[in-house]
């Protein structure tokens, strides 16, 4: 039996549709992951084959002024889950990099987070690696689904309300359908070896800017909203964003024999679910 934390988020919801009754699903209402004693007691009473930790503090801009809570959820909660569970799949982010690369980031590239969110997620990675018996960390990026708040839903809503939009074109990465990531996790689960501790990268295939992504969302959604490219400096945010966060996925494809769809195909699948 598996345990899925953060079960009401984008990835947690996707995992529920795939794992069904093979897992127990919890969110903060069922268990406070930032309470070490509570986590210890829960996992002692309920030993799971593997924990899939989808819980995260993902309000990137808010984290800049709410570092304590971001650290509790992104760094301490993974520490407790890794310490008291025997096997964990932990979800991390492209924000552990500074975005100055010009070729896709590999798992061996130096991490250099430039935001509180990125720093606390990197702390979480280290806590998992250093405390778990068996740990698979999967970094992903630009996640979206029909559930929760995300770029696709925001663009569709604005596209229905407006004639035009400005979207940054100088931040480049890969949109990732949460269901594609969930399928990769489910494929990997039976292949994880006891004692294995590895970091992997997973996004959908291909590369685009947020501007390209927004344009494709309008086109696939049949919305007549014109998208104009702007620079990041024209759309300032409290937290710095990586300008380049394309992830190299060769390692996860080889290790778990995973086929990854192109991001446009991922978007098509998602829009069919709306």
Image (tube, rainbow, N blue to C red):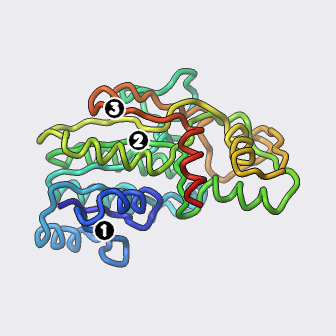
Q: Residue furthest top?
A: 103
Alpha-carbon neighbours of circle 1 within 10 Å: few (<14), some, or many (≥20)?
many
| Mark 2 to mark 3 CA distance (whole Å) | 11 Å
| Mark 2 to mark 1 CA distance (whole Å) | 21 Å
Q: Nearer the viewer, mark 2 or mark 1?
A: 1
Q: Residue at x 58, y 45 (%)?
A: 267
Whether residue 79 is situated above or below residue 7 in the rendered picture: above
- Considering the numbered disc 3 on the image, is that residue within a helix, a strand or a loop? helix
Q: In the figure, residue 56 lies in which quadrant?
A: bottom left
Name the image quarter holding the N terminus: bottom left
Q: Which residue is mark 1?
A: 25
Name the image quarter holding the C terminus: bottom right
Q: Picture coordinates of residue 264 (x, y %)?
A: 59, 38
Q: Mark 1 and mark 2 in contact (Cβ < 8 Å)?
A: no
Q: Residue at x 78, y 38 (%)?
A: 231
Query: Residue 63: in sight, yes or no?
Result: no
Q: Residue at x 15, y 56 (%)?
A: 49
Q: Which residue is mark 3?
A: 252
Q: Picture coordinates of residue 266 (x, y %)?
A: 53, 43
Q: Which residue is mark 2?
A: 139
Left or right of 206: which side holds 189? Answer: left
Q: Picture coordinates of residue 176 (x, y %)?
A: 51, 44
| Mark 3 to mark 1 CA distance (whole Å) | 25 Å
Whether residue 29 is situated above or below residue 142 in the rendered picture: below
Q: Earlier in the sequence, mark 3 or mark 1?
A: 1
């Amino acid at each position: 039996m598996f345990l899925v934390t953060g079960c009401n988020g984008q990835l947690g919801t996707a995992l529920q549709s795939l794992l069904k009754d093979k897992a127990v699903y919890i969110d903060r209402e069922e268990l406070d992951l930032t309470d070490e004693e509570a986590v210890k007691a829960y996992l002692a009473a309920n030993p799971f084959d593997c924990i899939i930790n989808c819980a995260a503090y993902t309000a990137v801009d808010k984290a800049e002024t709410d570092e304590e809570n971001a650290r509790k959820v992104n760094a301490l909660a993974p520490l407790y889950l890794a310490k008291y569970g025997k096997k964990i799949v932990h979800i991390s982010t492209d924000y552990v990099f500074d975005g100055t690369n010009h070729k896709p980031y590999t798992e061996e590239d130096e991490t250099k987070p430039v935001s509180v969110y990125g720093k606390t997620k990197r702390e979480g990675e280290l806590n998992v690696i250093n405390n778990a018996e068996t740990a698979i960390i999967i970094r992903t990026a630009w996640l979206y689904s029909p559930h929760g708040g995300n770029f696709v839903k925001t663009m569709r809503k604005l596209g229905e309300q407006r004639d035009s939009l400005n979207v940054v074109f100088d931040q480049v990465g890969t949109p990732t359908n949460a269901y594609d990531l969930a399928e990769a996790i489910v494929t990997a689960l039976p292949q994880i070896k006891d004692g294995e501790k590895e970091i992997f990268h997973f996004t959908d295939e291909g590369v685009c800017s947020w501007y390209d992504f927004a344009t494709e969302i309008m086109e696939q959604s049949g919305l007549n909203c014109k998208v104009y490219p702007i620079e990041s400096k024209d759309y300032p945010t409290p937290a710095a964003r990586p300008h380049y966060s394309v992830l190299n996925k060769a390692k996860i494809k080889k290790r778990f024999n995973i086929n990854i769809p192109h991001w446009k195909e991922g978007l098509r699948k998602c829009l069919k679910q709306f």
